[in-house]
Image: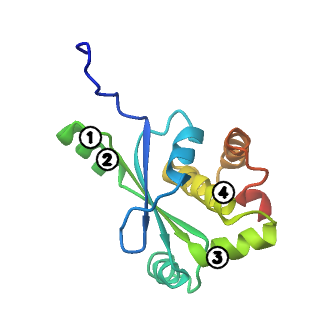
Amino acid sequence: MAPGDQRRAPRRLQVIVTDERGGRVRSTLGSWLERVAPASARGTVGVALVSDARVRALNRQYRGKDYATDVLSFPTDAADRSATAVRTGRIAELGDIVIARGVARRQAREAGHPEWTELRVLALHGLLHLLGYDHETDRGEMARLEQRLRRKGGLREGLIERA
């Protein structure tokens, strides 16, 4: 870089937090998730903070379950990620995390911590799913990684431990 050139190298992970209508949300959630993410996490992640009704509709449509769950992850197809990265020369799109605000609020109350803590717990869990981890089938690999990253991010408990 030439002296005075202010360009920066792209982050290994970029997180964009939005509301239900796609408007940007001013929050520390994105920068926190970027900081605690595993070193292998590269690309762009969208985190949408939405109503319970919206999550219920998505859960019904994509998982066949008719209730509002706390967090859903929608990974971008790996082939699409590769093609996008090659075609545009940009960081690849990892996918989207959708968090139900009402469910998060209730879970925060039950856990005895602030809502922003619960949003971090849910976003981290969702990110690990985007990265291909599955706590239902991986014999504890996701749980161990989530525990390590939670400690790094200052969280005392995670979603897997509650189940």
> Which residue appears at 67% of the width and 62% of the height?
118
N-terminal of the pair, mark 2 or mark 4, is 2
Disc 4: which residue: 121
Q: Which of marks 3 and 1 is in front?
A: 3
Name the residue type under label 3.
Val
Q: Position of residue 88 (x, y in %)?
A: 19, 41
* Mark number displayed over residue 30: none
Name the residue type under label 1.
Ala
Real-space CA distance between mark 4 and mark 1, rounded to the nearest whole angstrom:
29 Å
> Which residue appears at 26% of the width and 40% of the height?
85
Disc 2: which residue: 81
N-terminal of the pair, mark 4 or mark 1, is 1
Residue 105 is left or right of residue 9, and the answer is right
Residue 7 is left or right of residue 102, and the answer is left
Disc 3: which residue: 103
For disc 2, the neighbor class at 10 Å (few under 14, some 14 to 19, many from 20) is some
Real-space CA distance between mark 3 and mark 1, rounded to the nearest whole angstrom:
35 Å
Name the residue type under label 2.
Arg
Q: Disc 3 vs disc 4: Cβ atoms closer than 8 Å?
A: no
Vertical order, 67 against 39 (above or below): below
N-terminal of the pair, mark 3 or mark 2, is 2
* Mark number displayed over residue 85: 1
Q: Is mark 4 on a helix, strand or loop?
A: helix
For disc 1, the neighbor class at 10 Å (few under 14, some 14 to 19, many from 20) is some
Q: Nearer the viewer, mark 4 or mark 1?
A: 4
N-terminal of the pair, mark 3 or mark 1, is 1
Q: Disc 2 vs disc 1: Cβ atoms closer than 8 Å?
A: yes
N-terminal of the pair, mark 3 or mark 4, is 3
